Amino acid sequence: MVLDGVTQTETARRIGVARGTAAGWMKQYRQGGAKALKAKPQGRPKGRSRLRGRQAAQVVRAITDKTPDQLKLPFVLWTREAVAQLIEERFGVRLSVWTVGRLPARWGLTPRKPVRRAWERNPKEVQHWPAERYPKVRAEAKREGAEIHWGDEMGLRSDRQAGTTYGRKGQTPVVPGAGRRRRCNRISSITGRGTLRFMVFKHRFTADVFIEFMRRLIKSAGRKVYSIVDGHPAHKARKVKEWPAEREDQIRVILPPAYSPDMNPDEFLNHDVKQNAVGRRRASSRNDMIADVRGYLRSTQRQPKIVRSYFHAPSVQYAME
């Protein structure tokens, strides 16, 4: 219409648009011809963000390899806010939390409950233990005809809650329980062949308790015992060091790398007991609680396959006896 001599104002009035819109179309036509007037998709392209592929790869590497506080961010866990701040500080790109919330799914990341691991842990020692040190311990035990036991202690409380229960939608079920907490302790040891030995007691775990357990362990094993335990203070007490030293032909205490509970198969027994012997039962007294724990451990003791299954966890890397 404009090319036929109609003014831009009249053209805009006839087709029902603002005069500025018509003027803009004419400007695009004069600069780029008819192709410049072709309709273009509006808004940001779907499935894409303002991050480039290389930048996104750097963000994913930072999330999987580091924690926010290691990168000097004011967060402990990776959240949408933490990822948004990381992107802004590194690349100067400001994204909303809703946009950031959609990015991890595209990168193959999902919310996961983290595993707590002490920073005092020495990664080199952890790698050295299953690759070199433990095979030597296993060879020495085989040469001496000894039995390798993995030991650990655990405190139990009656108010532990495990699992779920049914309830009406939108209403949280209420489980009755005593307000007073009841406690007991348990020490145990397991072997790769499925042998389980345990002791449940009320008092505090001390060096004397550990010595008493070792005495019982030697008696029940009927041969020399290699006891692998963690760095609990009771395991390092002077009397604990002296007691096995006087009985070198009966027992040997070995300490694996510090702060590495994931490498002890007995830790999986701890989790099993907390979930099934305490967390799913309601004891009316401490004696009932101790009876429940002993009953569950005895039932596990009669099923060596269950004990051996603790050695097949992804974090445990030991050859079966």
Image: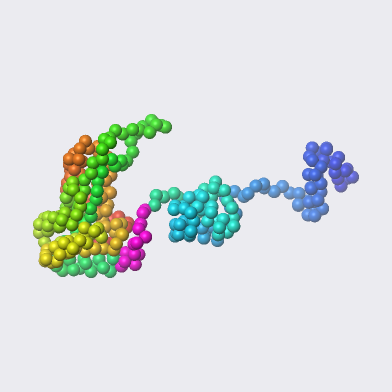
Residue at the front extreme?
238
Let me know if residue 12 is in the magenta part: no
Q: Which residue does the image show at 49% across and 56% down from the upper left?
A: 73
255 or 48: nearer the eye? 255
Any part of residue 166 in sight: yes
Q: Which residues are magenta?
A: 115-128
| Numbered marks: total | 0
Q: Residue 151: where, in percent of width, then height?
A: 21, 56
Q: Can you say which quadrant of the picture contains the C terminus?
A: bottom left
Residue at the right extreme?
5
Q: Residue 196: where, in percent of width, then height?
A: 18, 52
315 or 33: nearer the eye? 315
289 or 126: nearer the eye? 289
Q: Which residue does the image show at 26% across and 38% down from the upper left?
A: 180
Q: Is residue 40 left or right of residue 216?
A: right
Q: Residue 209: where, in percent of width, then height?
A: 16, 54
Q: Which residue does the image show at 76% across and 49% down from the upper left?
A: 37
